[in-house]
Each structure stands twice: as C-alpha cells, then as structure tokens.
Image (tube, helix red, strand yellow):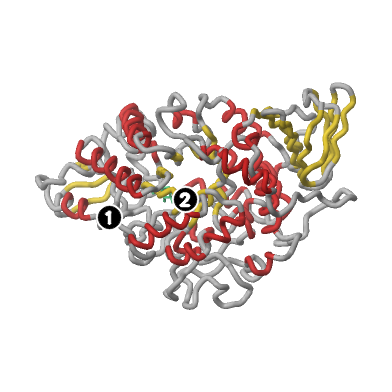
C-alpha cells in the first residue's frame, strides 16, 4: 500500500535541507595543497590494537556499526529482494570497509506495512530473506570475521496480522483480549500524547467492528500497540530477547524504546517503561558481552535512555546531530552540533553516544548535505571523530542518492537498493527486477565505479575508518569543544592516553579562519584533510577551505 504519510521529522528535514543544484564539484575556493588522506588500510599494529579494544564487555564503544537494510542490500536468488545469503556474500566487503558490527533492520516475518516494523512472528525469519539456517550461518560467518550482529527489536507494537492481534480483536473475552490497548471511545483520558494524533499524523484509534471497540496505534493502523500492563505481554517480549541472545546475537537496536507503557502524564519513558527497560537490561546482562542501542522518541536529548549509565541502554542514537547536521551546514553556524556535543557530554558515566548521519527514517545524507560532497565528507568526519560509536547506514560509503518512488511511504527515498556495479539495469543488486527502483546516479554510486578511484567517497570512507581503527581516543577519549571566534568553524579536542587530536570542520561554503583559546598545544600536525593550524602563545588559529575539514595531531 502506498502512503503519502511520513513522520513529521522527515518532512521537516526534507524542507529545511532541500538539495540545491546537484553538482558533484565542491563549492568555493580550496586551500592550495592537496588534502591529506590517511592510508586506505589500517596498519598491523592498529589491527592488533583494534582486536584488543573489541574484546570484552566494552567492545561496542570501539566498534563501527553498519545499518543493513537487508531487503535492499544484495539479492542472491533473483527475486528482486535482498536476502541473508546476499548479505553473507558481502561480508568481506564490509569487513574490508572497517565494519565491526551489523544492525539488521527487521527481518522477522512481516506484511511490510511499515518496512518490517510490523512483525507477525518474533521468533522466525521472513522467507523473503531466507531461513533460520541462513541466519545461523550469518552468525557463524560474522563471528569468523570478528564481526557481530544486532537485531532490530520492535517492542512497542506488532503487525495487525500477528496471531495475537487476530485473537485479541475477536471479542472482549478471549485469552489475548488484554494484549493490546482497547477503548470504547476513540480517545482515552489515561493516555497522554497520541490521544488525538499518531506519530504518522492520523488518528491513533481505529475501530474494530468485531469488538465494537477502538485499538490504539502510535504508528500506522497496521501496527497496534501492545499493552505492557498485561504481564504476559511484558514477559513474552523479554523471552523474545532471550531467544535471539541464546542464538548468539550481540544485542538489539530497540525500536521506539520509550513508548512501551501508556500513561496519563508521560509521552515517553513513563516510570513503568523505565522499570521495564531495566528488566530488559537485566536479561541482556545475563549474557556476556551484549549491548543495546535505543531509538529515542526525543530528538534532542537521549540522556534519560541511559538511566544511571549501567541500568538501561548501553547506547542511544544522537538525533540532535544525526538528523539536524544538514541545517548546521546550510546555515554556516555550528550551534546545532555544538549543542548536541554539550548534551552528550552530560550523559552519565557509562553511557555511549551512537552517531549517525542518516538512517532508513530520514532523507539520504547526500540530500542533507545539499548534494555537496565536501559537506558530506565533513559530516562523516564528525560522525567518526565525535565521542561515540558510529553507525553507517548502508550505501553512505558510496554516497547513495535518494530515490523517487514511494511504495510504502516517502521514506523509501532513502531505502533504495545498494549499487554494486555500474551496469544498468540491475547494478549487481539482483538478476531480477529490484523491489524498489534505484536512486539517482546509480552507476556513479556503485562500489565498482568507486573502488579504484582514490578521490571517491568509498576511498574517503575506507581511509577514515582505517584512520580511526585501533585508537581508543575516538570511541571513549575525552572531548572538548573549542570556542572559536568564527561560528562557522566547529573545532574540538579529543584526547586519551597520550593521544591528542584537534578536529575542525568549516560549516560555511567559503574559506574561513578563526581563533580560539584553550587548545593547549604549541603545534599541530595535519593528519587528515586540509587546512592550517598555527599557535601563538595561548591562541590557536585555524584556517579551512570551503566546507573543509582537518584533523591535527596536537603537540605540547
Ligand atoms: C522507528 C523506525 O525507525 C521507523 O522506521 C518505524 O516506522 C517506527 N519506529 C515504527 O516502528
């Protein structure tokens, strides 16, 4: 079913950062010397250091994750849908890129009213993606490569076609009668937020003739909310988590984790929800070296998702950066990013920020960058050097462009198939007809086209990830934003165990320079990007090209 609907945030973002002319050439003047690009591969010493950092319970703080839209990644059987065997065939590509862990978008059986976020069986694999044996093989093959797998755990709602709902909707007395949120009226005083409007903008109440009652759905009508006040529901979902953990998944990306319990006062993270999430954490902690990442409902502050730092989520997405960085570049003002970093610096000890520049929910990063590769690179550099764990959305490494076809909703623009080869019509994704047409510039964004080109986005990503690899400083080192007197220049210092770096990005589309106090260094050696850093006593001056970026290794 095609929908014109999409979450308000996606709509807002596509309006604010609407792409200007689609020109691959970076705008404005560039500094005269060429950019410094670190090697495409990490050194053996870095690899050894990475192995140590990625061992033990803190592995996720030093990992680079990759969000895989399995349906769009690689088809193995010509039906036009990506699948697990296709993903298996691309593990070496991901390993070589520098990826340590995969987050798979939902692969459980689903009628696909919301891209799999409407599940009909929590303990099975949708046949379109393969079998449980294929999934088990994925666990074995990722492990053999030192990689891990996160599942997407959709706790808040099921599919309308889930057998639980099919039973619940029949009458008011069946065994599952209380598993969903029912009401005699299309609104309930004891449910705050979403009483009148769902997250997708329609009424969140849909009438069920058999029961002569309305059911509550914060998302599409095909996604009825589970009732967590029913103990059997609460238990069932903890058991679901245990089921996948026993199989060997490394953890979960928890969909809209704050919304589980409906209450009269809280929209999100009601006290009952917090209590429940703590019990989920206890399940996670009963397995060694597992982790979770929360999808917060709030866009600007993920602090409450960490609890005391060790009793709720290990990580939470930083949407303040992840969804809004394009606005900072478009306005040439660092405030949005600086505020995001300040908020993250207030997280409780133990919390780990999860950093994105795009996802299946928002426009492609290419669009957020206003189709400017220099901005795009600056945003990716920030994602990889701000304190936290980066999550690369599939295809970002080749700057996949947005598509134009909306099968489910407008978010499909960011869910188009991966482009592996230049050759139209199927670009190595499938031998059949792709379930969703490719995005723009499919040949130019193919892995083949970029593989051997040292100037390509793929080369940039490879060298950026190689640069980062095995250095504790990027995942967990201290972070300090510098008060540069030009607001277009975002600069911060990262330090840990004798390593000190200054990262600087120019958010303006012309060359800019600015001064700051407090960098605490006499000199800086340019190790990535292009620009100059000069120190004069306490003052440090940073000069960058149009939308330019640079990383300097600082010396006392
Ligand atoms: C968040 C997911 O990221 C989004 O794609 C989905 O529509 C909603 N949760 C509902 O599950």
Which residue is most to the left? 173
Question: How many numbered marks appear?
Answer: 2
Earlier sequence position, callout 1 versus callout 2:
2
Q: Is residue 371 visible?
A: yes
Report which quarter residue 423 is drawn in: bottom right
Looking at this view, is 471 or 340 the one in front? 471
Say whether residue 397 is left or right of residue 290: right
Looking at this view, is 132 or 185 the one in front? 132
Q: Residue at x 63, y 41 (%)?
A: 470
Residue 543 x/y as whole percent: 84, 39
Residue 108 x/y as whole percent: 34, 56
Looking at this view, is 301 or 378 the one in front? 378
For label 2, count other residues whose C-alpha is less than 10 Å away and answer few (under 14), some (14-19) or many (20+). Answer: many
The quarter of the image holding the N terminus is: bottom left
Q: Which residue is drawn at 75% across and 27% down?
A: 483
Q: Mark 2 points at which residue?
A: 103
């Amino acid at each position: 079913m095609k929908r014109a609907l999409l979450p308000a945030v996606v709509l807002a973002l596509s309006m604010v950062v609407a792409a200007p002319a689609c020109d691959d050439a970076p705008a404005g003047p560039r500094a005269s010397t060429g950019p410094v690009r670190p090697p495409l591969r990490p050194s053996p010493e870095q690899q050894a250091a990475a192995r140590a950092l990625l061992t033990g319970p803190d592995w996720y703080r030093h990992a680079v994750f990759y969000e895989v839209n399995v349906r769009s990644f690689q088809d193995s059987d010509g039906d036009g849908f990506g699948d697990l065997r296709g993903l298996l065939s691309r593990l070496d590509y991901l390993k070589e890129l520098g990826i340590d862990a995969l987050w798979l978008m939902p692969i459980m059986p689903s009628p696909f009213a919301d891209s799999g976020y409407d599940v009909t069986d929590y303990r099975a694999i949708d046949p379109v993606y393969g079998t449980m044996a294929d999934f088990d093989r994925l666990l074995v093959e990722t492990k053999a490569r030192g990689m891990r797998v996160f599942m997407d755990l959709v706790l808040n709602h099921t599919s309308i076609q889930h057998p639980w709902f099919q039973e619940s909707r029949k009458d008011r007395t069946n065994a599952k009668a209380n598993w969903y949120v029912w009401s005699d009226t299309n609104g309930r005083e004891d449910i705050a937020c979403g009483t009148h409007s769902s997250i997708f903008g329609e009424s969140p109440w849909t009438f069920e003739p058999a029961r002569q009652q309305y059911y509550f759905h914060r998302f599409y009508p095909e996604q009825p909310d589970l009732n967590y006040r029913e103990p059997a529901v609460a238990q069932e979902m903890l058991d679901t988590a245990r089921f996948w953990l026993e199989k060997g998944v490394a953890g979960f990306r928890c969909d809209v984790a704050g919304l589980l319990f409906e209450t009269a006062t809280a929209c999100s993270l009601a006290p009952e929800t917090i209590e429940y999430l703590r019990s989920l954490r206890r399940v996670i902690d009963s397995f060694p070296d597992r982790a979770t990442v929360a999808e917060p409902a709030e866009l600007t502050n993920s602090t409450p998702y960490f609890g005391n730092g060790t009793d709720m989520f290990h990580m939470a997405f930083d949407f303040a950066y992840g969804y809004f960085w394009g606005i900072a570049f478009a306005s040439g003002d660092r405030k949005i990013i600086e505020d995001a970093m300040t908020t993250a610096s207030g997280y409780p000890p133990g919390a780990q920020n999860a950093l994105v520049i795009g996802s299946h929910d928002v426009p492609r990063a290419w669009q957020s960058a206003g189709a400017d590769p220099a901005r795009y690179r600056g945003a990716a550099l920030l994602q990889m050097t701000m304190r936290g764990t980066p999550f690369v959305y599939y295809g970002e490494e080749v700057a996949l462009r947005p598509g134009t076809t909306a099968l489910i909703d407008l978010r499909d623009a960011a869910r188009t198939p991966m482009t592996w080869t230049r050759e139209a019509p199927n670009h190595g994704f499938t031998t059949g007809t792709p379930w969703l047409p490719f995005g723009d510039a499919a040949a130019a964004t193919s892995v083949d086209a970029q593989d051997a080109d040292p100037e390509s986005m793929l080369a940039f990503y490879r060298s950026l990830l190689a640069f980062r690899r095995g250095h504790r400083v990027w995942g967990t080192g201290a972070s300090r934003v510098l008060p540069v007197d030009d607001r277009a220049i975002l600069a911060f210092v990262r330090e840990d165990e004798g390593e000190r770096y200054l990262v600087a990005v120019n958010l303006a589309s012309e060359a800019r320079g600015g001064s700051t106090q407090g960098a605490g260094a006499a000199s800086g050696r340019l190790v990535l990007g292009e620009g100059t850093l000069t120190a004069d006593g306490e003052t440090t001056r940073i000069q960058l090209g149009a939308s330019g970026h640079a990383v300097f290794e600082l010396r006392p």
